[in-house]
Image: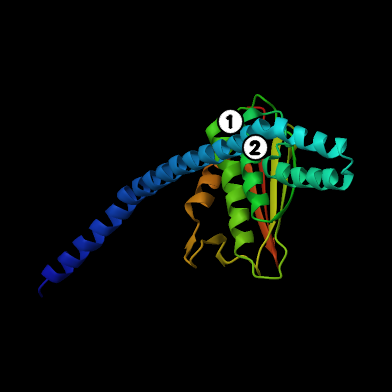
Amino acid sequence: MNLVPYVIVGAVLLINVLLWIFWMPRYVDRRISRFQNELVDRHYAEVETMYRKMRGWRHDYHNHIQVLKAHMELGDYGDALRYLDMLNDDLTTVDTVIKTGNVMVDAILNSKLTIIREKGIQVDATAVVPQDVPFSGIDLSALIGNLLDNALEACLQMGDGEEPFIQIYIDIVKKQLYIAVTNSMSGRARRSGLQYLTTKSGGHAGVHGFGLVRIDRIVSKYGGFLNRQDEEGVFATEVMLPLVEG
């Protein structure tokens, strides 16, 4: 009996198994590391865009006041009111009303909220975060940024006639940082077993996209709790991170 073919097949299978065990985790780690770097760069660019808009608006503030004064002096109260309405609409694009108490979270939240509002998505945000937290600033930004990116992606994929929304709630609950993001979506989320499928623009889906993996790893890193739930038209994620090391 010629055993050579079986030996070759066995060797090939062994090599594949060893590659999967030793090479695949490193490959995934490299991809996630690159994804994190790209995420940080994108967040930085978003924050820069937001503050550039703020600086531009402040630069024009004097001119706006002069226009309003001219309308008032001429008795053009209707024009003055319309001008104020226009300024109010313009100001909402650089609104930084979210002041959590944590500078890093303020930056990422406000930059994401600016983008979400520009896309015409209804958003409701409430956030309280301690200035000093036992988490890396990069990790916390990546966590919140990924949650909001996923919510935004789901809203952008909704069809005409549907009303997209995103709700954000962050607070301190029983010595833990509680983060909840709820968003609208078309239909129900797709799953493969216990894992959610992420669908990106273009229709490509993959089990646990790198954004979800990053969220999972950050929560696990700090011994936190993660819960994802969905129903028709709605997806929700809850995260709890202990504020007291123990």
Report the side of 180 relative to 213 (left or right): right
Q: Which residue sits furthest bottom?
A: 1
In this figure, what is the number of numbered marks? 2
- Is residue 100 something that shows in the picture? no
For image coordinates 21% across by 64% down, the residue present is 10
The one of 185 and 229 positioned closer to us in this rendering:
185
Q: Are marks 1 and 2 in contact (CB under 8 Å)?
A: yes
The one of 116 and 166 positioned closer to us in this rendering:
116
Report the side of 237 relative to 173 (left or right): left
Q: CA distance from mark 1 to mark 2?
A: 9 Å
Reading the image, the residue beneath label 1 is 135
Q: Residues within 10 Å of mark 1 (few under 14, many from 20)?
A: some
Q: Residues within 10 Å of mark 2 (few under 14, many from 20)?
A: many
Give amino acid for label 2. Leu
Give amino acid for label 1. Phe
Residue 147: x and y in percent read 61, 48
**Numbered badge on residue 241:** 2
